[in-house]
Image (spheres, grey):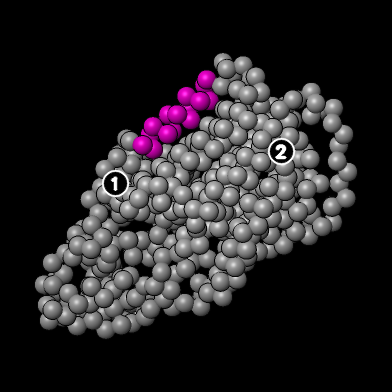
Amino acid sequence: MFPAASPDQAAATAAPARVDNDRIPTAIVVGAYCVLQIALSLQHDPWNDEAQAWLWATTINRWQDFFILPGEGHPPLWYWFLKVLSFGLDFSQARLITLPIALLNAFLLARLLKGQFLLLTMMLFSFAVLQFWGYHFRPYSIVFLAMLSALLLDRAGRSLAATWCLAIACGFHFFAGFPFALWLIWQWRRGTPWPQLVLPSLVAASFGALALVSGMGNVTAGASTVSLLDGTLANLSWIVVHPDARHPLIALLTLALLCFGLRREPILLSGLIALLVAFSAGTSAVYGKFPWHLAFMTMMCFMAFMVAAPRSKTWVLLVLLAPQVVFGVSAVAERLKHPAWAEPDLFAAISADAGPSFEPATQLVAWPDIAGLTTAAVEGISFRSGNDGSVMGPVDWLTWDYSAFDESFLTTPRPYWVICSGCQPLLDHLKQAGLSATLLASKFNLDDGPKEAYRVE
């Protein structure tokens, strides 16, 4: 039996409390999770999305961009948060802020799952909570904090405060609207007076509208699969995390397990299935299959089983989490084998080669320009876009052309230096123009892939 809120609050209040015999094992597993988060944070090599958000937040200069960031497709609160951090911290310092949030989440999860040691362990070591929803410098850990706070507040009888927590989470990520919608279904099922839900719902909807307007015109949006059905089924088999391991049979098994586990709460179950299908179809049609986004489906299922207790089947949630634990632990092992300090610093290699007169804003080119984002954020510099020749801050998703070459770099004064990913087309283009490129260093980022640094003469 879960210790979270039940559909019948009076019954939940009258239910006998679980005896917590797992205090020491709980402390051990939470401590192990915290140690891993610290280790993973220290070895982390920032990736493009972390840098892109930081560069946007620190370069906003029009008031309207504080609400609608061109092409980003995100609500504004994460960028406001980064803007505040930037007043006193640089990128390398600010990105550590998600670590204490991840550690706090572990303690809140332990409190929520008191007496549920196995479920606590599997949640903490699942791919989402251990990786992108943990120490990564993205808003997911804040969304998770809001979800855990909501469940704990609801258990304490403060459902309105819980609803506001989830409404505010919608300001940090567009997809937070899905668990918020599930929450509203549950509140309706439980008989919460609708006037209490109107204002937080309007706030959440406003954040969603800002995100949709922000994403209009993003040239990278588009179906990631030929068939919408295939993409939807692939996303519905999210429990196996890795895209190559997904299969329609896993999707059907997942839905069957959910139907069995929540069969005593048909309204909640119907809402959950509808939201999962909508999420899977929508992300397949517009956004893709990124595991850190599909984790929202894991969190919706977790929330459903928590609020439906004791009328839900605990073991179903454990089965859904099992493959995610395998992927989570495997990802930890892989990341710890490739710490950031074991890879060359491309900017340091370029600076050493260029000498003291090096001016990145005119002599450093990134192709495609997204390859230079982390360098720009970490070093606090600007660079030239190899795609269109502009002086770069964040990438403009409204005009971005990943494969374009700016021809002015064929005649620009040399030498100049290049950071690139997928470099061969660029090298071929330079060679055809009679230019030579000398490799200075190469590195591998587990999230962005390989990158290389060259001197062009």
Q: Nearer the viewer, residue 195 or 294?
A: 294
Q: Residue at x 55, y 70 (%)?
A: 335
Count of numbered labels shown in the rendering: 2
The residue located at (87%, 34%) in the rendering is 16
Label 2, on which residue? 312
Three-letter code for the amino acid on which mark 2 is drawn: Ser
Q: Position of residue 403 (x, y in %)?
A: 23, 63
Residue located at (62% from left, 16% from top)? 193
Q: Is residue 109 magenta?
A: no
The CA distance from mark 2 to mark 1 is 41 Å
Q: Secondary structure at mark 2?
A: loop
Q: Does any portion of residue 53 appear in the rendered image?
A: no
Residue 331 falls in image quadrant: bottom right
| Label placed on residue 218 | 1
Q: Secondary structure at mark 1?
A: loop
Q: Quadrant of residue 32?
A: bottom right
Q: Nearer the viewer, residue 412 or 238?
A: 238
Task: Specify the segment rendered in magenta.
Answer: 198-212
Determine whether 365 is above or below 26 in the image.
below
Q: Is residue 268 above or below residue 279?
A: above
